[in-house]
Amino acid sequence: MCTTAAKRLNQSWFLIKTRDPVSWMRWDDEIKLFNARTDRFKKLIVQNPNPREDGYYGGINEKGVAFVSTYVHVAENQISYIRRPYVRLILDARTAKEAIKIIKSFHPRIGGNMFVADSHECYGIEGVPEKYYVQKIAKPAVKTNHFLHLPNRNLGFDTNPSFEKWSKDHQTRAQELIKEANTIEDLKNILKDRKNAKKNTAICTTGNEEKCFTHSAFIFDTMKKRAYYCQGNPLDRPFKQYSFP
């Protein structure tokens, strides 16, 4: 249960995300620099702190290629992007187009709503077990926990009707805000947004409202090759800036 968005600002593509993990996922996360011999480039990845468990949630590499995603469960054999080492492999790319080629090389396919970008181009991807839908992004865009192009329906909507409203409220509100965003602070404020809190469908949700509330948030600047990461709920915790040594 996450909200992701893409926006071009100041000759850079920015990718943003709130992380609202479901009950069976690890709730806490951390940002880590990957710079091993097995890595093609240095990478800042938001991940599960336990290296023995799955959990790569998004990242950016020193070439300025960034990736964010949110899971859309449409089939029992759907493979989640959070499984290691998918995000780490995607960030072997020099460009957004190369990242798409890497994603398409995975068998079985990884599923969900994805954004991948470099400083020049951004693409939105919808993934299901049988295919990918890839769209070049030319204007501000938002992806939550339902698809806008593929007909596949999130199975969670059938067992939890409020989840569908949650996803669509997030989509509508984030789309309103991302169109008007002009600064880093505007992007941070999207990730903190509290409109619809009375309906328990605010973009930034608290533990008093939902079991699956906002545990972290992050922003990737592809031109300056920076990450702005909030470890914890952004209503209570600051965003810290990370770059490559």
Image (cartoon, rainbow, N blue to C red):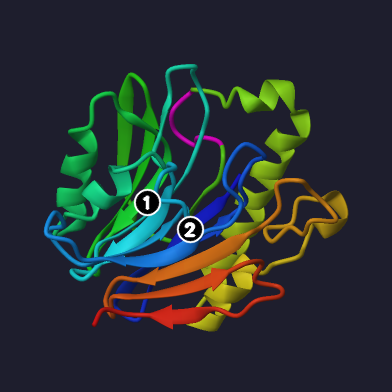
Is residue 193 or residue 175 the one in the foreground?
193
Residue 96 is tagged as none
Mark 2 = which residue?
5
Q: Residues within 10 Å of mark 2 (few under 14, many from 20)?
A: many
Direction from residue 3 to residue 213 in the image, left or right: right
- Residue 23 is situated, as x and y percent measured from the top left of the image, at 67, 39
Identify the image quadrant of residue 228: bottom left
Task: Tell me, yes or no, whether the highlighted magenta stretch contains residue 210.
Answer: no
* Amino acid type assigned to the residue bearing label 1 in the image: Phe
- Residue 31 is situated, as x and y percent measured from the top left of the image, at 43, 66
**Numbered-mark total:** 2
Q: Where is the N terminus found, in terms of image quarters? A: top right
- Residue 122 is situated, as x and y percent measured from the top left of the image, at 30, 57
Direction from residue 207 to residue 184 in the image, left or right: left
Query: Disc 2 versus disc 1: distance between alpha carbons?
Result: 8 Å
User: Decide: marks 2, 1 in contact (CB < 8 A)?
Assistant: yes
* Residue at left offset 27%, top offset 51%: 88
For numbered disc 1, what is the local secondary structure? strand
Mark 1 = which residue?
115
Which residue range is magenta in the image? Answer: 146-151
Identify the image quadrant of residue 85: top left
Residue 183 appears in the figure: no
Q: Where is the C terminus found, in terms of image quarters? A: bottom left
Residue 25 vertical placement versus 215 (above, below): above
